[in-house]
Amino acid sequence: MMEEDMENGRSYLERPRKFSTVRSKKSSIPLVFRRLMRINPRALIILFLLVFSGVLYVGASTSPIVVFVFCICTLSLFFSFYLAKWVLAKDEGPPEMSEISDAIRDGAEGFFRTQYGTISKMAFILAFIILGIYLFRTTTPQQEASGLGRATSAYITVASFLLGALCSGIAGFVGMWVSVRANVRVSSAARRSAREALQVSFFILDLLSFISPSTIEFQVMTNSSKQIAVRAGGFSAIVVVCMAVFGVAILYATFYVWLGVDSPGSMMVTDLPLLLVGYGFGASFVALFAQLGGGIYTKAADVGADLVGKVEQGIPEDDPRNPAVIADLVGDNVGDCAARGADLFESIAAEIISAMILGGTMAQRCKIEDPSGFILFPLVVHSFDLVVSSVGILSIRGTRDSGLISPIEDPMAIMQKGYSVTIMLAILTFGVSTRWLLYTEQAPSAWLNFALCGLVGIITAYAFVWISKYYTDYKHEPVCLLALSSSTGHGTNIIAGVSLGMESTALPVLVISVAIISAFWLGQTSGLVDESGNPTGGLFGTAVATMGMLSTAGYVLTMDMFGPIADNAGGIVEMSQQPESVREITDVLDAVGNTTKATTKGFAIGSAALASFLLFSAYMDEVSAFAQLPFKEVDIAVPEIFVGGLLGSMLIFLFSAWACSAVGKTAQEVVNEVRRQFIERPGIMDYKEKPDYGRCVAIVASASLREMIRPGALAIISPMAVGVIFRILGHSTGQPLLGAKVVASMLMFATVAGILMALFLNTAGGAWDNAKKYIETGVLGGKGSEAHKAAVTGDTVGDPFKDTAGPSLHVLIKMLATITLVMAPIFL
């Protein structure tokens, strides 16, 4: 066979085999799906039609716009099923690949069940706390006029909170479910492509034996592997966005019909979005703990595996002799896929709810006859997001026949083309949406101003993606210089990485500043005025810009999911001891995945900044409504309010410290375990003894669940404690809104500090990772060189930065905003 010459003339099949049994138990399917699979298909179809008919009836009783949203979401779900079927139909490769993939699946599903079991218990406890608070809180005059009592308001908020938590958990499960099934299919496609390339190369060399092999450049056939990874990520992305839109739309329509909104003596439609804040808080709560637990898991395993395997033993990444390698690969799924799905779900839900609140408030102040367009506009924008992202996903396909020789294809360039297609369609559909829903006779040109606000948001999203790519892709100068600093030692690598991360905060902050001011000005000059003639569209303009930034969220999440799937595929190739040519293909995809993960994190923090600004404004409006006092500004010259700002900034640093510390503590346990196994089982290095993979998985799982509690509790308890303490102080000193103002200051400073810290952590970590990948391509001595060892140290430092603390801050700053909205009554 041709494979016999692939590595130093030695048959791949003759190399020492890896341990054939690494799977611990049969893969489990969730109970709900097992029960559904037992139902007769015809009965399932009838059940689906009944449910869909009921949803359509509720939607039709609310607004034709809601019916449109329901239909788009339903079609998008069918499209996601098509993507899943397409991916799962691909070959899983040889048995040694499937066995490793099954072991990863077992570990991921086991940890997911345990982690979300813990989160669900905490969610129910918090739900009872919210119920108690709302049963004894005061009500707004609007709620009293509509007959919405304390009990009804309490049950609505708790139900919304639990539904948001459930949907966020499902979003995480979907991300994990697809990734653990797509990884082996990407590996198999890479293996098949390498074989095809090898056959072509030997055929040509037989014909042209006088040509040196070094003069022939073969295309790395990444088309099939890339397409599988993209469509697998696309399935998860479409489901996550669809669930976020569907969940908010169903809640809105259900409350609209149940409460008889806009009928005489009932609630006005402009006040309805305030009932949805519990949904956003539930999504934030689950996303925070999912990101913390998954991030600690994945990076503790990764750091432990790298420090002992790469640095001490000198074995390759994902080598099967490393006892922590399965835990590392499991971490990619629970930390990057499951957690990121929950993260983006929470981002979209929070942005939709905050924009609906601001749209309703503005429509009420401007006395717009039909305010439903301004309230439902975010749902329509994200419905179109599903459409344009689906087109962008389908645009990524192979561009040539396999077996041909051509210049090496850059997967990143192909994905950027797909992103460009998505952006162009998003601009078009955003203009259609604004003309359809935001046109009003009071200001005929206002829709155009808001369309420009959306364009500002779309440009901001593109700028964030480009900036993150510039600072994290080794095709650009910053990462190349970071790699060069590794040639002079570990210390210079760390210094260069830290300085790069700090520098990378400048451009994004400038972009966010320009975007907020531009969108606010466009909204303010839209022509919409209140009864006194004062312009009122500024905040809503900023909300529209946020919607524009998130109008391509489906495709952005697809790019994010691409990274861990490609990383897992490379691990499976290494563990199953495939030829080096196969690993070269997965390494190309992995490096691209590092960049896409970094760019999507930049996108996430940008959207979090804008969404938090909106939620902050909504919080001030809610406090004003409850207290019946004006609340338009926060004066940091007041000592108590300034202290609140200091506490908010401190919260970001303490939270980040505890998150990184959790990774460090867990990694120490992994390092000690891996070292113990190498000492007590010397035959591991000669493939004569099998490492105890399960022991490392168990250590990381239990430690990550234990360590996620402290920073998560800090994030939830601190704003409530600060608000209550300063509320008591305010009442004793004659300052009735002091508690609410101090919390507002805390929220404001925490948002600013969180944006900067997250940008620094995400970018520095991604740059360190890709500097290592760059050296592994052969520059500066390649693998095993002193520069490579220094780069591994930098990557180890950057791991908790970019995959634990940094992404958790995205969720934290949004959760602080949603928790203040839900808990506002206890601050008064």
Image (cartoon, helix red, strand yellow):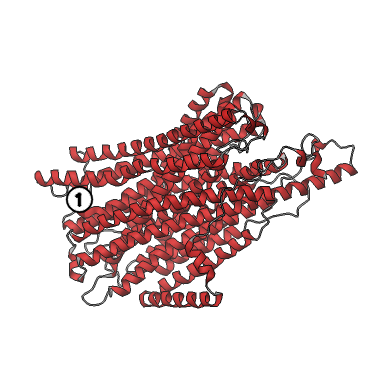
| Above or below for 62 versus 636 | below
Location of residue 110 in the rendering, given as x and y in whole percent from the top left corner: 49, 50
At x 40%, y 46%, the residue is: 810
Q: Return the residue at label 1.
A: 827
Q: Quadrant of residue 442?
A: bottom left
Q: Above or below — where is 170 with respect to 311?
A: below
Residue 677, percent from left and from top: 56, 32
Q: Quadrant of residue 262?
A: bottom left
Q: Is residue 581 visible?
A: yes
Between 197 and 415, the residue placed more toward the observer is 197
From the viewer's perspective, is 540 left or right of 627?
Answer: right
Horizontal and vertical percent for residue 10? 79, 36
Residue 419 visible in this rendered orientation of the protein? no
Label 1 secondary element: helix
The percent coordinates of residue 237 (x first, y second) are: 51, 57
Along the line of sight, the residue nearer the viewer: 679 or 258: 679
How many labels were placed on the picture? Answer: 1
The quarter of the rendered structure image containing the N terminus is top right
Q: Residue, x 76% and y 36% (percent of image)?
A: 7
Kind of residue at badge 1 = Phe
* Residue 581 as seen in the image, left or right of residue 447: right
Q: Label 1: how many residues lie within 10 Å, few (<14), some (14-19) or many (20+)?
A: many
View extreme (top): residue: 488
**x 37%, y 62%: residue:** 163
